Amino acid sequence: MTAIPPAPSRPRLAVFKFASCDGCQLQLLDAQGRLLEIADRFTIDHFLEASSRDLPGPYDVGLVEGSISTPADVARIHEIRGQCRFLVTIGACATAGGIQALRNWASAADYAAAVYARPEYVATLATSTPIAAHVPVDFELRGCPIDVGQLVELLTAVVVGRRPRVAPHCVCVECKARGTVCVAVARGIPCLGPVTQAGCGGLCPACDRECFGCFGPGPQPNLVSLTGFYERHGTPRDRLVRLLRSFTPWADDFRTESDRLEAADAAANAEPRP
Amino acid sequence: MSDAGSRSALVRRIDVRGLARVEGAGSLRVRIGPDGTIEIVEFAIFEPPRFFERLLVGRDVREVPDIVARICGICPVAYQLAACGALEAALGIRITPELRLLRRLLLAAEWIQSHAVHVFLLHAADYLGLDSGFEIPARLPGFVENGLRMKEIGCRMLEVLGGRAVHPVNVGVGGFHRAPDPVAIRGLVPDLEWGRAAALAALDVVRTFTAPAFPQDYECVAVAPATGYLAADTEAGPRIVSTAGLDIPCAAFPAHFVERQVPHSTGLHCLHTEPDATTGGRPYLTGPLARLNLFRDRLPPTARRAADAHLAGPCRDTFQSIGVRLVEIAAAFEEAAEIARTCHAAVAPCRIDFAPRAGTGSHAVEAPRGLLWHRYDIDAAGLVTAATIVPPTSQNLACIEADLRAFIPGVLDLPEPEAARRCEHLIRNYDPCISCAAHFLTLAVDRPPAGPCRP
């Protein structure tokens, strides 16, 4: 990540979409009541979901939602990178490939045939990958969806010309700050909070359920230790594999660990039972 | 945005390459032949496919509501509730009336926020000749600002019940992970009352907008509401009805509606057909107009009076849909306030326990854009073995193309950019949610020869 460049008085903003649900762009339309203020501080020159105004680049800031999953996407993201001084990926799809990256473990032809009668009409790549796998990215906002507060912080930082401040810790810290009783320790629920990037405010444990890692792996996560703990307390490996393969399954740490668990499970099942 | 094709031999094209102000990615291609006949109308979806029905296979039923939410960031609750209803039917779970009431409140919240985004930020600009909702405050002070406040109230309702507005985390098979706080729910009531009045005031403004008269004959299809106007859970399972007299249980949907894939789109087209018909089928309309035409008498009192005053008789013109959405926003606020006032204690139990078992279940919900149908097969361990999801926009695609065929001759004499703009307006009347439309299953699977997918 690089330091943010000094912004002109009204930076030119562009929002781009790849494979995604539109939920992260919708957070921009939420913006905690600050949408019209944002629209005043920027010139919104390309934001197809919200405006027919469509001016060519170069742009000062580009927000990119979605993952790369078609041949056309690959060409388009390079073109977009060339048009954006500061490129920010927003959300689990753009930063980690999204839930659609589950196809990366299977055959894309098999996937297309299961959904479409004539799969030859559908142009798709075998994988769904994050934007950073294709072009350099200057900053990323995690989450499925991204947090509105973090988005407003990012845009504010752009206007002021400073580096955005986002939490450098894991969800566990947010639960402690919120006063949530730990669902893993107190109730034995396998929870990804100890290894997941903060930003949601510790939302799921506050709803009496596990964190399923939608902000992706946090800083220096010790996954082997955590899954070992859950296994020793009775959680089957296949359930842990599914937990890691949710909304950021292709993020390095989660992918590596889910592959390790799956291989261990396969090896255990292959052994003759007494 | 649009370009004129070759004018030689009087062949004209209207191309809208990147359709704006819709959720998802779509385009429109029209070709008119030398004799003036419309040769091609293709409302194409180039939303990259994400294969949700396939990636659900092998997942635990408890994970399904979180996964299907990600199909659409604008209407995740409808997806969650349709999945919950279908899985509960498969698992034999009986949902209590108290939980059903909270689910209706949740659906009302989604209607409010989704409709408010469309009416104020995406659609109103079409009637005012502007590029976006951001430009409206300078023209109509207060209009968009009030709309955004309605949207915020919808989001706040979603947070109180679901934990967050986009992809709520508190919705599960059997109910809610944690009982929503009744004090917070009752605390919404003043805002809900403000919202109802504000929606009706906005309806007065929208009435002054000019729009083309474009009445069409539609067969309107919708899920019959259990009580009130908002279709939500019923104990007996939802019924699907139409203005042509259709009245079927939700499980019979595949016998009456067929999906067809077309080369120009990753979204399938859904048509109404006769049971067991192998070919044919006709377009049908789902969404706000369909609901109003079928269930006007179910509207709560204030919304009903406004509908009768401003939208009398059967509503057959999608250019009036902006007013219908405002009536529905008012109705959702009105029904929500009624429910919220009765929330005196935390719902108990907040979630019905269940044991996994093999089974099949289907369910239908009225998403903001219309009928949403889900069906799941699950095995004895509670893992999904097959999933089918039919979203509303796929059902409206054939209708949109039929509309365009009827509409385009009337705009052909206009300059190309203006003709394209009017066609876009027509498409936006449907509030197409294209991210959803790209993900659904054909009923017949025609396996391709082995080999990699064509790039």
Image (tube, coloured by chain):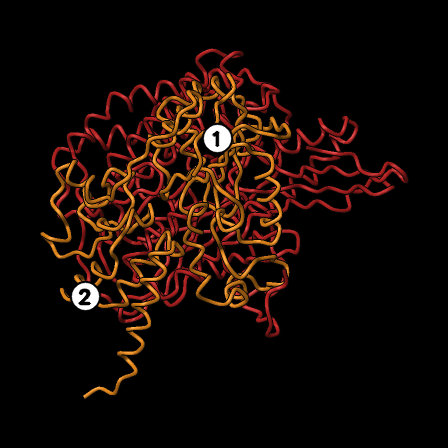
> Alpha carbon of mark 2 to alpha carbon of mark 1: how far?
47 Å
Chain ID at mark 1: B
> Which quarter of the figure has residue A258?
bottom left
Residue of label 1: B118
Q: Is residue B322 above or below residue B251?
A: above
Chain drawn in orange: A
Q: Measured from the top left, where is residue B15 in percent x and y?
A: 71, 38
Secondary structure of residue under mark 2: helix
Residue B209 seen in the current view: yes
Residue drawn at (64%, 41%) of the image: B27
Residue of label 2: A231
Q: Measured from the top left, where is residue B387 in percent x and y?
A: 41, 61
Q: Measured from the top left, where is residue B135 in percent x and y?
A: 54, 18
Secondary structure of residue under mark 1: helix
Q: Measured from the top left, where is residue B169 in percent x and y?
A: 28, 45
Please name the amino acid that badge 1 sits on: His
Q: Work out whether residue A171 or residue A1 is closer to the camera in this orientation and state it.
A: A1
Residue furthest front as drawn? A3
